Image (cartoon, rainbow, N blue to C red):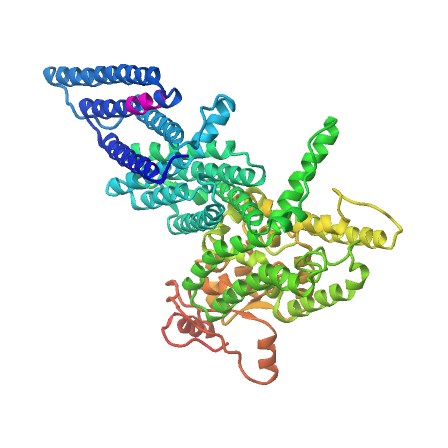
């Protein structure tokens, strides 16, 4: 290692090289003549020549190395002179022939040359400065891959590249569309916050936390952006999918680096991100085209977006768990070695993949991270909502998630019950309903029964909105602005289309029956196992533990990512949640339903906004309102979007509160908000005409 003053000189040189490269990239992005393009290539070649000559010397720090470095730099500089001379001749010839010197846009070969030279320049600089600082060996012992990892994961590469990207974004801020510039700036910040850049433990912790926060902020911005802009440019749509794929690989690479020191995948992802960044800034014209991609009509694109975000989040959550609570995370997931016969390797691979995903998605920091991200989108919906009841419910959704998905199963019960299995004291929320071969065993059955009694009573009194629309984590995940906008896929997706309406189709009955039947089978097997009558395990776990993990830690997230093919809120729509099935059964015998003030208003309505707003596709509700004045369905999860969507303020939720008011002889009072005039139509004869007239007036409508 060299002294502090020498390191400062190297840092200043690296900063100067980064600033010079950023300026050249700006020239390259705006070059429209052959001479200017040739000048950019000439200067990049000059930089490569200088750094390459220095590298030759540092590889062989002797008089011979100095001479070799000089000749290498001279030879490359000679090539660069040929480039600029050729560009000058082409420019002169164009002028003599009367052809325009200005080109419409950069050509592919020119862009490839600039990208290649920038990448080569960064690799050579990282290698040279690493040798000069004494932090990087020649690399012969580690081979080419080891050398590549050492260069890319060094501060001379990562910090220089991050600063270069940030400065380039600033220099081209006027030439880039605002959203593109924001995402590119976020890319730069995430690059600067690369944990492997420094060996310091303090830096590693800071970079993991700050980098994760920056990435969560980026995901929230992207989600909210596509919610606000239902049409995107084709270039930006492609860019988002590629960026999220890169970040998925990068987070996996960081997890592997923290787990066993392997930095190869992270290095590859960094180079891929760099190429994506500079390709975007060098070819910004397509990003300024009119937006024509309607993403709600592109299920494959929406799936790629959700999958990229989810993969990055899974490994980000695992990274945070490994950094913050390595012992607890290691105890939740013990991988099997992939060795032996093919069948053994296949089983161990399935075992490792299943329990890694289950342990990560059930971990505290993954749930906390998802809560921040999806909770922010719910907050945005809260700000949009005008109905007091909906706003109260959304506040409860965020509070319930923070308390019962994050705080109580981890911090609270870990402190109160330090010797109990993780989450065992929260049967419905944490460990698999408390039944199994763990220490608590059959003694927790009373708690389980009480839990379901409370859930059933709440569903009977207030509808399954008390569970599926408020208490369950699905409410937070699906009720944010962007995911809520994906309810359009309920009607367009092949699978989701089959589950439309309140009718319990054969497919719905099969999925619900499988969920409830699986619960009963797993519980029976677990009880018999506890009693010592029957010993059976699935993937090394108690049957109930496995069934719980399969249902809520694996399949739930798989179907969540598959929203563009299945429709949103598909745990309710498809009926595969056994907790929801229990709440559904109690809702059938309870007070909950949707009612309207005037069926006549619904008969004259042509918007059908209530049905369009339903996140689970209950498209037949308008017909019930027109004929019966109310709608009762065991599938309705009571999020209330239909109430806010009604343009006439004619719809409200009816539950035990309204029943009690009726028994007490007091008319139900329901908040009224924005109300539009009725669609013009010939008034019906008789009393209904007065109702229609009242519905179209600005004055108060008949009380509910």
Vertical comparison of 394 with 518: above or below:
below
Q: Is residue 111 magenta?
A: no
> Residue 399 location in percent, x, y?
54, 65
Instruction: Find residue 108 and report its horizontal and vertical position in percent.
Output: 31, 23
Q: Position of residue 115 (x, y in %)?
A: 33, 27
Chain part drawn in magenta: 49-56
In front of the other: 183 or 500: 183
Q: Can the viewer see residue 589?
A: no
Specify the quadrant of the image occupied by residue 158: top left
Question: Can residue 386 be seen?
Answer: yes
Measured as percent of width and height from the top left, residue 250 is found at 49, 38
- Residue 51 falls within the magenta-colored stretch: yes
In the rendered image, the vertical position of residue 19 relative to residue 74, given as above or below: below
**Residue at (63% x, 60% y) in the render:** 409
In the image, residue 119 above or below residue 304: above
In the image, 289: left or right of 420? left
| Residue at x-position 54% and y-position 45% | 319
Along the viewing direction, whichever of 666 and 179 lies nearer the viewer: 179
Q: Is residue 162 left or right of residue 566?
A: left
Residue placed most toward the observer, 264 or 429: 264
Q: Main secondary structure of the magenta part?
A: helix
Q: Quadrant of residue 443?
A: bottom right
Q: Residue at x 53, y 67 (%)?
A: 396
Quarter of the rendering occupied by the N terminus: top left
């Amino acid at each position: 290692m060299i002294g502090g003053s020498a390191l400062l000189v190297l840092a200043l040189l690296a900063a100067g090289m980064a600033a010079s490269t950023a300026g050249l990239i700006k020239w390259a992005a705006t070059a429209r003549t052959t001479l200017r393009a040739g000048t950019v290539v000439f200067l990049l070649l000059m930089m490569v020549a200088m750094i390459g000559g220095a590298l030759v010397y540092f590889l062989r720090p002797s008089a011979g190395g100095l001479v070799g470095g000089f000749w290498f730099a001279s030879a490359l500089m000679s090539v660069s002179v040929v480039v600029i001379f050729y560009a000058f001749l082409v420019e002169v010839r164009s002028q003599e022939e009367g052809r325009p010197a200005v080109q419409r846009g950069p050509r592919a070969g020119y862009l490839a040359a600039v990208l290649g030279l920038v990448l080569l320049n960064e690799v050579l600089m990282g290698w040279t400065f690493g040798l000069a600082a004494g932090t990087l060996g020649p690399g012969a012992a580690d081979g080419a891959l080891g050398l590549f990892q050492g260069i890319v994961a060094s501060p001379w590469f990562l910090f220089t590249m991050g600063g270069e990207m940030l400065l380039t974004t600033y220099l081209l801020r006027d030439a880039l569309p605002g959203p593109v510039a924001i995402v590119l700036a976020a890319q730069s910040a995430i690059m600067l916050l690369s944990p492997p850049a420094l060996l310091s433990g303090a830096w590693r912790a800071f970079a993991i936390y700050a980098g994760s926060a920056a990435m969560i902020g980026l995901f929230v911005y992207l989600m909210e952006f596509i919610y606000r802009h239902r049409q995107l440019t084709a270039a930006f749509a492609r860019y988002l999918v590629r960026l999220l794929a890169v970040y998925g690989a990068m987070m996996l690479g960081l997890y592997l680096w923290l787990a066993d020191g392997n930095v190869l995948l992270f290095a590859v992802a960094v180079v891929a991100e760099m190429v994506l960044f500079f390709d975007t800034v060098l070819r910004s014209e397509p990003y300024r085209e009119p937006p024509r991609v309607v993403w709600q009509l592109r299920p494959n694109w929406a799936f790629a977006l959700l999958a990229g975000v989810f993969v990055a989040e899974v490994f980000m959550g695992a990274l945070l768990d490994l950094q913050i609570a390595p012992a607890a995370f290691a105890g939740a997931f013990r991988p099997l070695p992939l060795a032996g016969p093919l069948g053994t390797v296949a089983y161990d691979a399935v075992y490792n993949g299943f329990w890694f995903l289950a342990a990560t998605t059930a971990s505290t920091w993954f749930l906390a991270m998802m809560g921040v991200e999806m909770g922010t989108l719910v907050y945005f919906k809260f700000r949009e909502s005008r109905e007091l009841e909906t706003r109260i419910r959304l506040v409860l959704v965020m509070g319930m998630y923070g308390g019962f998905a994050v705080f109580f199963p981890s911090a609270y019960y870990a402190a109160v019950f330090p010797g109990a299995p993780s989450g065992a004291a929260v049967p419905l929320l944490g460990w698999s309903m408390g039944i199994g071969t763990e220490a608590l065993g059959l003694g927790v059955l009373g708690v389980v029964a009480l839990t379901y009694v409370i859930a059933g009573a709440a569903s009977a009194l207030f509808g399954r909105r008390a569970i599926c629309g408020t208490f369950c984590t699905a409410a937070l995940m699906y009720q944010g602005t962007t995911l809520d906008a994906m309810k359009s896929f309920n009607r367009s997706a092949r699978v989701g289309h089959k589950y439309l309406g309140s009718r319990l189709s054969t497919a719905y009955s099969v999925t619900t029956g499988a969920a409830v039947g699986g619960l009963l089978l797993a519980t029976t097997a677990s009880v018999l196992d506890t009693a010592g009558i029957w010993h059976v395990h699935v993937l090394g776990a108690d049957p109930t533990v496995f069934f719980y993990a399969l249902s809520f830690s694996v399949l739930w997230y798989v179907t969540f990512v598959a929203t563009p093919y299945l429709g949103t809120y598909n745990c309710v729509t498809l009926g595969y949640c056994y907790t929801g099935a229990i709440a559904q059964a109690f809702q059938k015998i309870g007070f909950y339903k949707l009612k309207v003030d005037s069926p006549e208003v619904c008969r004259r309505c042509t918007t059908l906004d209530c049905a369009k707003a339903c996140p689970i596709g209950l498209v037949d509700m308008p017909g019930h309102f027109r004929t019966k004045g109310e709608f009762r369905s065991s599938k309705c999860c009571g999020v209330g979007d239909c109430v806010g969507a009604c343009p006439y303020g004619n719809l409200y939720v009816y539950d035990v509160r309204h029943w009690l008011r009726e028994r007490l002889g007091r008319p139900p009072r329901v908040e009224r908000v924005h109300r539009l005039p009725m669609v013009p139509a010939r008034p019906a004869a008789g009393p209904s005409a007065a109702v229609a007239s009242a519905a179209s007036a600005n004055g108060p409508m008949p009380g509910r």
